[in-house]
Amino acid sequence: MSASRTIICLLRNDLRLHDNELLHWAQRNAEYIVPLYCFDPRHYVGTYHFNLPKTGPFRLRFLLESVKDLRNTLVNKGSNLVVRRGKPETVIAELIKQLGSVSGVAFQEEVTAEELNVEKKVREVCAKLNVKVHTCWGSTLFHRDDLPFHHSSSLPDVYTQFRKAVETQSRVRPLLQTPEKLNPLPVGLEEGSVPTAEDLEQTEAVTDPRSAFPCSGGETHALARLKHYFWDTDLVATYKETRNGLIGVDYSTKFAPWLAMGCISPRYIYHQIKQYETERTANQSTYWVIFELLWRDYFRFVALKYGNRMFHVKGLQEKSVPWKRDMKLFDAWKEGRTGVPFVDANMRELAMTGFMSNRGRQNVASFLTKDLCLDWRMGAEWFEYLLIDYDVCSNYGNWLYSAGIGNDPRENRKFNMIKQGLDYDSNGDYVRQWLPELQTIRGADVHTPWILSSAALSHAQVSLGDTYPTPVIVAPEWSRHFNKKPGGGGPSQRGKKGPSHTPKQHRDRGIDFYFSRSKNL
Ligand SMILES: Cc1cc2nc3c(=O)[nH]c(=O)nc-3n(C[C@H](O)[C@H](O)[C@H](O)COP(=O)(O)OP(=O)(O)OC[C@H]3O[C@@H](n4cnc5c(N)ncnc54)[C@H](O)[C@@H]3O)c2cc1C
Ligand SMILES: Nc1ncnc2c1ncn2[C@@H]1O[C@H](COP(=O)(O)OP(=O)(O)OP(=O)(O)O)[C@@H](O)[C@H]1O
């Protein structure tokens, strides 16, 4: 077996060939490259506090598709993806021994405890076996080394300050060139088969035709999605007006699942936006995709700054909140049986598809933490289990933010479930899509079945407490919106926000808009 100048590239959340720092580096430094993916058993245990399955069926399916897709891509480039079941540190030790003379092991750095623990163990194994370790930074739009802060501890605690600093003082790096051919595997190395969900003792995902994310995993599908959203349909040019939608695939980019597994590079998205802005149009919407990608960057750098505080009950602010751990309420929330239709519809969508819109996520997180007053980590772990796009930093960062113990500078923010339902699902179509038992209630009345007269309920054949639950809570402020005509602040109205602005103006307007949107929730 030939193994001179062989480098093992441990791939984790970087399942792509394009703009892949690791493979790019290995291509220049090795004669033989072993691109390796390990199905780590630690990803298939229970979550830390509430022992929910750590990887749910929708994400697992997406992962398996992504691994297969990367294998196909690598085979077409003269290489292959080596797949193993086992802990990376064990698999790598075995490979080093099997191959004889591995010159290096490389991986992309992660930032959170469980991933850092894997890195530590891989380093220990390599040190014992006298093999060098090379690491690189990836995953963010702005490279960690290009941030305008001397140290991660000086990262601002307010997103806007971070955003303005990187926008004015940093630059997104150019894309790395995708190799025409990749240096081969060492001769005789078995590539290994991609397991099934069953092999991993996990549940198969069941496809729901209503899914807002009916897409497959893998770089090929990620690049096709971008082509569709940017170049084939120009949807990116109206993103800011549609991004708060709830139904269908195209109201937002849906890049998140591919970004989470690294099937698409955020730099690639950025440079495609720049090209789109040059060739087609530049407006608030095209900028806004970058604005949102910067949130993703921000939470990753927040994790670098705060370490395990990201997971602690008191959050980044070290704030004691008397969270409850009422399992009955938690079950009602998880299963979409709280009796608050807008919450239930979103929670059922998540459970049945592994996806929920950003609007939905903000609402159900606010409901769990501010209305039910449940421990925010219950919600975070439920999302960790189910989301296809679960990303440790974006998930825990957003949950902390929603719970009021993270990076939100404003105090006591709370979403009003009824107002939100009326604003963003003004005719109740979204609620009816996910709550078949309320299908016969017409229009916006579906948001508040408990205030309907018994005649109206019986006409709709809805029996509260029987076919649909009575609400577990009715917050006092909701009553202001009972019987109100819908409309006002919904997404379609936002679309009529005025024409073009200079880039500077539209950025500032964008921020004002972002915050005004948040004040009266
Ligand atoms: C409680 C809660 C938990 C969340 N958990 C996750 C998670 O685990 N993984 C995840 O990727 N996103 C998470 N988000 C952020 C956001 O809801 C999703 O990124 C978005 O809904 C995915 O759909 P999209 O790709 O169509 O987004 P788009 O609206 O098209 O946005 C484009 C991209 O910007 C990034 N982005 C947008 N909003 C945010 C945000 N608030 N924080 C970080 N990045 C953002 C994503 O990478 C997204 O793909 C969470 C939000 C909340 C409120
Ligand atoms: N990648 C990850 N995904 C999810 N959770 C993670 C990840 N990495 C670390 N954690 C969480 O970080 C925490 C580990 O931090 P730490 O060692 O400070 O915990 P701890 O002191 O045991 O926590 P606690 O204060 O809750 O008892 C755990 O809650 C763990 O679930």
Image (spheres, rainbow, N blue to C red):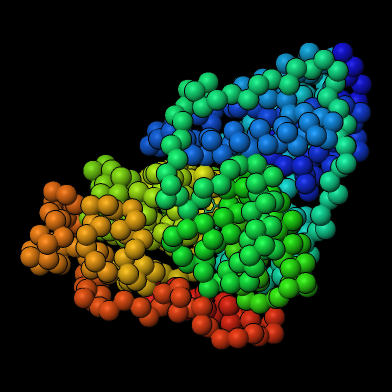
The picture quadrant where one finds residue 460 is bottom left
Looking at the image, the residue that sits furthest to the left is 455
Image region (quadrant) for ligand 1: bottom right
- Closer to us: 241 or 325: 241
The picture quadrant where one finds residue 22 is top right
- Closer to us: 205 or 340: 205
Residue at image location 81% in from the left, 39% down from the top: 23
Image vertical order of residue 444 relative to residue 338, above or below: below
The picture quadrant where one finds residue 475 is bottom left
Image vertical order of residue 519 relative to residue 456, above or below: below
- Closer to us: 104 or 471: 471
Question: What x and y, as percent, mark residue 143?
Answer: 75, 55
Locate the C terminus by quadrant. Answer: bottom left
Look at the image and tell me whether residue 141 can be seen. Answer: no
Question: What x and y, as percent, mark residue 138?
Answer: 73, 48
Locate the N terminus by quadrant. Answer: top right
Residue at image location 70% in from the left, 63% down from the top: 231
